[in-house]
Each structure stands twice: as C-alpha cells, then as structure tokens.
Image: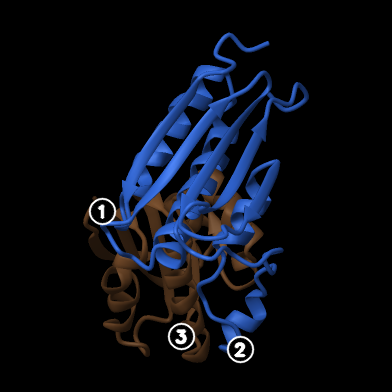
Chain colours: A brown, B blue
Amino acid sequence: MQTPNKVSQLQLTGASGQQITCIRFDGDISSASKDAIVGTYQALDKDSNKHILLDFKGVEYLNSSGIALVIQVLMEASKSGQTIAICGLTPHFTKVFTMVGITKYAALYPDEAASLSAL
Amino acid sequence: MNVHSGSKVEVQLPSRLGFEKVAMSTAAGMAKLMGFSADRIEDLKTAVAEACINAMEHGNQMNASIPVSVVLSMKADELEVKVMDNGSGMDTPAPTPDIDRKMSGEEEARGMGMFLIQALVDEAEWVSGTGTDEQSFVRLVIRMNKESE
C-alpha cells in the first residue's frame, strides 16, 4: 500500500555562491521512509554538505510519522552545524509544517528555483 | 441543504499501515461531492489518515486481522467521519507539539497526529469504548463555511 520512495541527490549552487546538496524525494513519506529520509541524510559527509535542501515535490502522501523523520534530520543537522531548507511542499503541507513549528528550524520555499534564489 | 444529505458510506480497513489512504480517498470523494473546497478536502484527508493510523497503531495494536471501521455520514452542511477501533481510547486534549522540546530530544519527534486532527477539522471528539460491544472511536466533523468555501 505504501508507494516506495525514490531518492536522488544533486549538487546545486545558490545565488550567494554556496554549495547546496539537494535531496529529492518521491513516493509516500511515512514511518516506512526512515531509510529514505534519515538514512540518506546520515550517509552524507557532514563536513562537505553544510547546506541541504530537502525537495518534496515528488511526494504523493505525507503523514505525521513522515514529518517526525524530517524533524529527526533537523535535530541531527542542528547538532552538526548544517542548515536545512525544505521545498516542494503543497500549500496544505506548507501549512502543516508551519503549524508544527518546523519553520523555526528550516526555511520553506515553494520550489528549488525559489530556494536557490534565497540561499 | 446538500442533495447528498443522509448518505452514509462505511469502509473497513485492515490494521496495516498504508490502508489509511483508502479512507482518505473515500473521505475526499464524499467531501468533493458535497462541494467542499480543495483546501478543506486536504485538511480532511490528513485528519482522516491520522485518525486511521492512530486506530491501527494504538487501538488495534497493528493486528491486521482487527479492522478499523470508518463511517462517513453526509449531513446538511457537514461531513462526519467516525473512525472506530478495539482499543481503550485516547486521552484528550492532544498536547500541542513543542518543536524546541522535540529538537532537544525532550519530547518524541512523533506524536503529532492528534494535534493535527484537532487543528485541521472543525470538531474532533475521542470517545472511549467500554468493551467488545462498544468500540472506541474518534468523531471528526468538517462543516461548510460560507465565508471560506
């Protein structure tokens, strides 16, 4: 019943010239997505990936267990001195992420282009 | 008065994660028939999904052979969704997630489902069952609101 996650990574350059590691997610983001969300983040070298953009544009379904995995990434990134930005959320999930307070620890952008302009 | 008022749909889900999407789709279809706006339907979908996940995990302890029953009732100006399980019920009100406590590890990262349900629908009520003859349930209501529809 869960649509499996596809994850891809790419290196982007923000308008300020900083290197940004973009992680794009597809499929359902739920409790079954720990490897996709947390595992992918943890596999990144913390010293060479200081700025990370999580792109949820391809995500079809997201629930509170999936949001908890995003919070886990924010926790670990905060301890490692990395910054996390998030893009590609639907207006509904932009509202939900704001309601649970994630915007205090990660900037939300409509899409990758808007993220790169701001970073 | 909505022309569909009085119509009722019942769905039985195995207590297996992923099947909450069946209830989501059913609720979304009914809300669309009633004329709810796209953003209210998104609110309802998330609330119904979280209610079903809670019923599977906490109510039925992920025993796939115990179904989660979802009864959706169209009324004049509202859609009511009852999600029933065999558990002992949930404590209310749900605490508001504290992102600072979550980030510091003082609060579990999970545990936002009930908060989201309460925040996204017009009415949410948790009722504890008294035994096998009377199930625990959460009752969700979204209402037509002329100002926002």
Residue positioned 28% across, 78% down in the render: A39
Q: How many marks?
A: 3
Position of A80 relative to A5 (above/below) = below
Q: Are marks 3 and 2 on the same chain?
A: no
Q: Kindly check if marks 1 and 2 are in contact, taking CB atoms under 8 A apart as contact.
A: no
The location of residue A50, given as percent across then percent down, is 43, 81
Crowd tier of the residue under label 3, counting other residues whose Cα lies within 10 Å: few below 14, some 14–19, many 20 or above: some
What amino acid does circle 3 point to? Answer: Glu
User: Between residues B59 and B99, which one lies in front from this camera angle?
Assistant: B59
The location of residue A59, given as percent across then percent down, is 35, 50
Q: Quadrant of residue A41?
A: bottom left
Secondary element type, mark 1:
loop
Residue positioned 39% across, 63% down in the render: B60
Crowd tier of the residue under label 1, counting other residues whose Cα lies within 10 Å: few below 14, some 14–19, many 20 or above: some
The residue wearing badge 3 is A76
The residue wearing badge 2 is B106
Crowd tier of the residue under label 2, counting other residues whose Cα lies within 10 Å: few below 14, some 14–19, many 20 or above: few
Residue positioned 67% across, 75% down in the render: B98
Secondary element type, mark 3:
helix
User: Between residues B78 and A110, which one lies in front from this camera angle?
Assistant: B78
The residue wearing badge 1 is A2
What is the C-alpha distance between the residues marked 1 and 2? 30 Å
Mark 3 or 2, which is nearer the eye? 2
Q: Kindly check if marks 1 and 3 are in contact, taking CB atoms under 8 A apart as contact.
A: no
Mark 1 or 3, which is nearer the eye? 1
Residue positioned 70% across, 41% down in the render: B122
What amino acid does circle 2 point to? Answer: Glu
Position of B35 relative to A22 (above/below) = above
Secondary element type, mark 2:
loop
- Name the N-terminal-most of marks 1 and 3: 1
What amino acid does circle 1 point to? Answer: Gln
What is the C-alpha distance between the residues marked 1 and 3? 26 Å
